[in-house]
Amino acid sequence: MPAFVRYLAPLLAFLALAALLYKGLSLDPHKVPSPLIDKPAPAFSLPLLKDPGKTLSADELRGKVWLLNVWATWCVSCRAEHPVLMQLAASGKVPVYGLNYKDKREAALRWLQRYGNPYTANAFDADGRVGIDWGVYGTPETFIIDKEGVIRHKHIGPITPEVLRSEIYPIVEKLERAG
Amino acid sequence: MKNTVRVLLLGICLAVMPPVHAGLEVFDFGGKVDEQRYKDLIGELRCLVCQNQSLADSDAELAHDLRKEVYELMAQGKSNDEIIEFLVDRYGDFVLYKPPVKPSTWALWYGPFALLLVGVLVLARTVRQRHRQADPELSEEERRRLKKILGEDGEGSGSA
């Protein structure tokens, strides 16, 4: 074995390991990939937040691209995300539906009154049962569902203006174009 | 007197101390649901919120809900595999402390053995090389020189 190979091999091995570990450092272990991507959105039928007499179901939303935003008034980062959702709703690019997760109805209604309501409608998931079906483990979480009712994307954590621009809008536009 | 103080202190400590299992739900294990099976199952499932705790250990809100879900699925007569499948379908392999063997986890399962094999090969090579160095073969030229030196020293024996 030529000498330079003998000396280079450990160096290369070290660099490969360093690159691997460096990549590991930049990953967020709290972002667990969802097995629901590219699967049909779990069916649900829940009372509306504003009007418990009426229901919202995933089936009604077939035929359009929509967002499901999981939120709660006890969720601190939801508060941080809220202005961005307002901006998203104002853009009119895609309807945002809310899943009000394990919350109190009065608190949620007060929140929407005080900070504004970016949601086309809100489903009220008091016991979090629908949240389990959607694999929700931390709010806020946002799903993008295509016209066939298939989940195409999940964003974990608050949507920032940057996420809106580089993630949400491009995906929504692509799904809108896809027939 | 001293004992009275001790007993009093102990009493105060016990009164102030929150019960350790305050977070655990009360389930009825009298019927169809086997308590040991339930405990084993939630012990091997991982909570997604506090990621280094099992569902059994975690006091996160989600862990409460999932424990309830597991209990209810057991009450419906679901098997362990069915319950695990239910959770994996929703939360992914992450809920398992023991990930399944599949192409994406081959590196995880077999990587250590591959590294061990590499180590053994390197070790074998090194040992062989050292062995060769310790017992070097003389070249023709060296042999002649050695003979000459030994010859000059009077057959190379007895002089030392």
Image (cartoon, coloured by chain):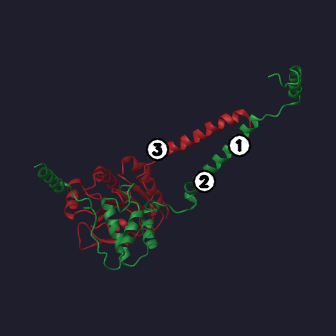
Mark 3 vs mark 1: in front? 1
Residue on which disc 3 sits? A25
Q: Is residue B113 left or right of residue B130?
A: left
Residue on which disc 1 sits? B125
Marks 1/2 same chain: yes
Report in which chain the residue with disc 3 lies: A
Report in which chain the residue with disc 1 lies: B
* Viewer-side residue, A43 vs B83: B83
Q: Is residue B143 left or right of residue A44?
A: right
Mark 3 vs mark 2: in front? 2
**Image quadrant for the N terminus of chain A?**
top right
Report in which chain the residue with disc 2 lies: B
Between marks 1 and 2, how big is the CA–CA gap?
Answer: 18 Å
* Viewer-side residue, B83 vs A57: B83
Which of the 4 image quadrants contains residue A149? bottom left
Residue B74: x and y in percent read 38, 75
Between marks 3 and 2, how big is the CA–CA gap?
Answer: 25 Å
Mark 1 vs mark 2: in front? 1
Does any portion of residue A98 appear in the rendered image? no
Residue A80: x and y in percent read 29, 49
Residue at image coords 30%, 71%? A46
Does any portion of residue B1 appear in the rendered image? yes
Disc ID at residue B113: 2
Above or below — where is B157 with respect to A59? above
Residue at image coords 43%, 75%? B79
Colour of chain B in the rendered structure image:
green
Above or below — where is B29 with respect to A145? below
Q: Secondary structure at mark 1?
A: helix
Label 2, residues with CA under 10 Å away: few <14, some 14-19, many ≥20: few
